[in-house]
Amino acid sequence: MLRLTRAPNIAIAALWADALQQAGIAASVQRYFLSGIAGELPPDQCLPEVWLTHDEEEPRARELLHALQNMPQRRWLCRCGEIVEGGFEQCWQCGAAMPPEPA
């Protein structure tokens, strides 16, 4: 087993591990419940970690993790005139779907 990374919180660790698993990479979250003793141990020792089952999957896992951590943010103009920013694919104002990007 190989520690891939530490996550800032358990929700992010679970999302990263799930994305890796969806890509066919065996991953798990360790230190899942350790945040409860933060203060008794140094805080950086209580962060959740994402571990790989198979060390040889590390290059592909790091590539996927980098892509997850650096997703491009979009900005688009909805037909109702609202500017929608971030990773949203639906307008918060009127509920319209993001128009398809030109090819």
Image: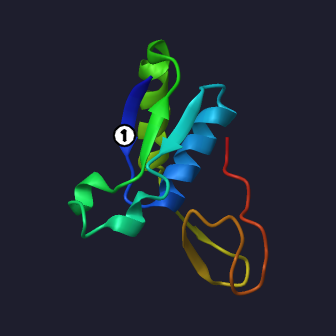
Residue at image location 68% in from the left, 82% down from the top: 92
Residue at image location 24% in from the left, 60% down from the top: 41
- Mark 1: few/some/many CA within 10 Å (<14, 14-19, 20+): some
- Location of residue 97 in the rendering, given as x and y in whole percent from the top left corner: 77, 67
Q: Nearer the viewer, residue 54 or 34?
A: 34
- Location of residue 15 in the rendering, given as x and y in whole percent from the top left corner: 57, 51
Residue at image location 60% in from the left, 27% down from the top: 26
Q: Nearer the viewer, residue 1 or 61?
A: 1
Q: Nearer the viewer, residue 22 or 49?
A: 49
Tell me if residue 6 can be seen. yes
In the image, is residue 92 above or below residue 99?
below
Question: Is 6 displayed left or right of 83 in the figure?
Answer: left
Tell me if residue 73 can be seen. no
* Residue that protrudes farthest toward the left in the picture: 42
Q: Nearer the viewer, residue 60 or 72?
A: 60
Residue at image location 49% in from the left, 18% down from the top: 57
Given the image, on which type of amino acid does mark 1 rest? Thr
- Location of residue 46 in the rendering, given as x and y in whole percent from the top left corner: 33, 56
**Residue topped by disc 1:** 5
Q: Quadrant of the N terminus?
A: top left
Q: State the image quarter where residue 42 is shown.
A: bottom left
In the image, is residue 74 above or below residue 23?
below
- Location of residue 54 in the rendering, given as x and y in whole percent from the top left corner: 51, 17
* Residue that protrudes farthest toward the top in the picture: 56
